[in-house]
Image (cartoon, grey):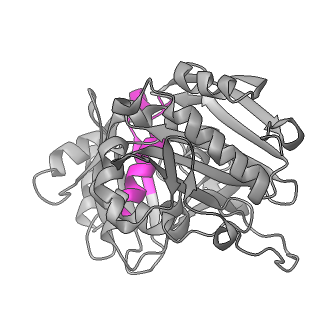
Amino acid sequence: MTVTLRPLDARGADRAELVAFLAASDFPFHVGERLTEDEADARIEAGAYDPPDRAAWWVEARGRRRVGVVVLHDLTDDGPVLDLRLAAEHRGTGLAAPALRALADVVFTTMPRVHRLEGTTREDNLPMRRAFARAGFVHESFYRQAWPRPDGPPLGAAGYALLRTDWAGATTTPVPPLERPPRTSTDLVPTLPLPVRTERLVLRRPTPHDVDAVLAYRSRPDVTRFLYQDAWTREVATAKLAAWSTAPFAETDDALVLLVERRDAPGVLGEVVLISRGWAAGQVEVGYAFHPDAAGRGYATEAAAAAVGLAFDRLAAHRVFARLDERNEASERVCLRLGMRHEARLVENDLLDGQPSTELVFAVLDREWPRPSA
């Protein structure tokens, strides 16, 4: 689902429309569940949307125009707090997670001093909690009986946050336990035989100079759809490439991205990624994305095979797995060509384009992976 944010002029041209929006719906998981138009106007007059401590945007979805409002509070801090409100008729349609991702893109590409983005919701607001998770936010806190209600005892409040470093690296840093064991792992990237060469391809680390080449396919909705991501802007691509070019591979959720080129011709065809999903257990996820112009030539299979081999031989992987939407038939064919086993079908466990999505899981073990004879 394509979601964009447009700056909201609360005291000027957008005032009447904002008042009408706030008064048109109940917001049961917000303090002040229902506002009259007078109350909404009074809130604007009191400075609820005024800079420099706040900023607001309309949430717009393709084909639906304005579907909600998102506000950032505490902008003078380096960890502003978000408030997302969607109109009643647009809730439950898969818009919340894309809206959160769009907000993160705006914040981390235009506000250099901000290093984390925070949000809190009531404990029983399960759709919003799932949206936070899908957008890459980590559940960091739980405040018992901290959310007052007019019709019952107070409920708990769940706090989430997204770090700039996680956003840039497309990773999720888990909250450490109270007594975290000392880190003994070391970055394996310097030990890798990079670039990796196959019969037709070269797999190499990205550099900040690859922005245009990666944006050529990452900006296409037909490519990013099955990545559960929005199409990239140049600002997002610049930040991601800067992070990818120096990212380590040393612990759970670290990711190694390799760009794929032909050996006999310049030009990026796509990418493969290896993500540590369980450092101690040797669990590594493989993913891939290619420009449609490179389809039908077996490049994805050849590059993914090289990445899986690298995971087993140099990254201490015990099991490599892939997750994909069952409608992504091209990706399923790649997994089957790699000899991966179809391990699971998770029925409607996620949303894609606002509709339930069924996930397939394919995997292969180290002892099952074919290697050239000595």
Classified by dominant secondary structure, the portion drawn in magenta counts as: helix
Q: Residue furthest left?
A: 13
Q: Is residue 194 left or right of residue 362?
A: left
Viewer-side residue, 259 vs 26 = 259
How far from the left and from the top, in percent, is residue 273? 58, 49
Position of residue 160 relative to residue 322, above or below, is below
Position of residue 226 relative to residue 329, above or below, is below
Viewer-side residue, 338 vs 118 = 338
Which residue does the image show at 26% across and 60% down from the upper left? Answer: 44
- Please give the count of numbered marks on the rendered protein: 0
Q: Which residues are magenta?
A: 83-107
The answer to which image quadrant residue 340 occupies is top right
Examine the structure image and report whether residue 77 is included in the region drawn in magenta: no
How far from the left and from the top, in percent, is residue 335? 66, 28
How far from the left and from the top, in percent, is residue 8? 22, 55
Which residue does the image show at 40% across and 34% down from the upper left? Answer: 223
Q: Is residue 181 left or right of residue 203?
A: right
How far from the left and from the top, in percent, is residue 233? 30, 52
Quarter of the rendering occupied by the N terminus: top left
Q: Residue furthest front?
A: 374
Q: Is residue 151 left or right of residue 108?
A: right
Position of residue 228 relative to residue 38, above or below, is above
Viewer-side residue, 183 vs 178 = 183
Examine the structure image and report whether residue 100 is included in the region drawn in magenta: yes
The answer to which image quadrant residue 358 occupies is top right
Which residue does the image show at 42% across and 75% down from the upper left? Answer: 114
Viewer-side residue, 47 vs 234 = 234
Does residue 48 appear in this view? no
Position of residue 185 relative to residue 347, above or below, is below
Which residue does the image show at 74% across and 66% down from the upper left? Answer: 251
Does residue 20 appear in this view? yes
